[in-house]
Amino acid sequence: MKRSILACLAGLLTWIVVVTVINGGLRLSLPNYTAAEQTLQFTLGMKWARLLMAIVTSVVAGAVTGGISRSSRWAPLIVGSVVLAMFVPVHIAIWSKFPAWYHLTFLLTIIPAVLVGALLPPRRNKDLNQVYSPTRYA
């Protein structure tokens, strides 16, 4: 139970950190992106970049959640649901600023992307005893 709670908190924190880092990259790499953020007047390319950012962020958050709580099926679902719940009111408030396909793509991919991330196999480091065993170098 504690591990599942920790996994959920880590997944949500990961979502915040990853989206912040990627958004910073968009600000640096896309001309006029920072200005567009202020008015929400994004080009089509910027909209797709933002959608990709959300999907990548959700997959990474799911991978972290699933990596910490391998036995919990609920932890990734909770993380995806919390993220979705945070963004539904935001998208309702800005509904007229974006086309419906943008809102629906964003909102409908959050939970599946987190769940896909949770299914990714965990990265395993080789056992240091195997890597540096004396018999290997003898």
Image (cartoon, rainbow, N blue to C red):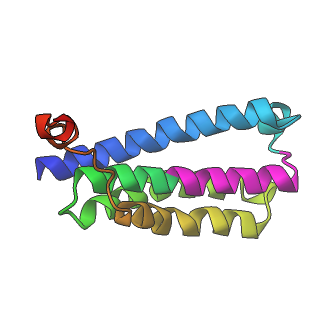
Residue 133 on the magenta span: no
Between 68 and 17, the one lying in front of the other is 68
Q: Main secondary structure of the magenta part?
A: helix
Tell me if 38 is positioned left or right of 76 in this view. Answer: right
Q: Is residue 26 above or below residue 103?
A: above
Q: Quadrant of residue 40?
A: top right
Location of residue 114 in the rendering, given as x and y in whole percent from the top left corner: 44, 61
Query: Could you tell me which quadrant the C terminus lies in?
Result: top left
Kindly identify the residue that appears in the image at 36 percent across and 61 percent down: 118
Q: Can residue 82 be seen in this snapshot?
A: no
Location of residue 90 in the rendering, given as x and y in whole percent from the top left corner: 60, 50
Kindly identify the residue that appears in the image at 29 percent across and 53 percent down: 67
Tell me if 67 is positioned left or right of 102 in this view. Answer: left
Magenta highlight range: 41-57
Farthest-out residue, front: 138
Kindly identify the residue that appears in the image at 40 percent across and 66 percent down: 115
Q: Can residue 129 be seen in this snapshot?
A: yes
Tell me if 35 is positioned left or right of 111 in this view. Answer: right
Q: Is residue 105 above or below residue 53?
A: below
Q: Is residue 3 above or below residue 119?
A: above
Location of residue 73 in the rendering, given as x and y in whole percent from the top left corner: 25, 67
Kindly identify the residue that appears in the image at 12 percent across and 39 percent down: 135
Residue 52 on the magenta span: yes
Between 78 and 134, the one lying in front of the other is 134
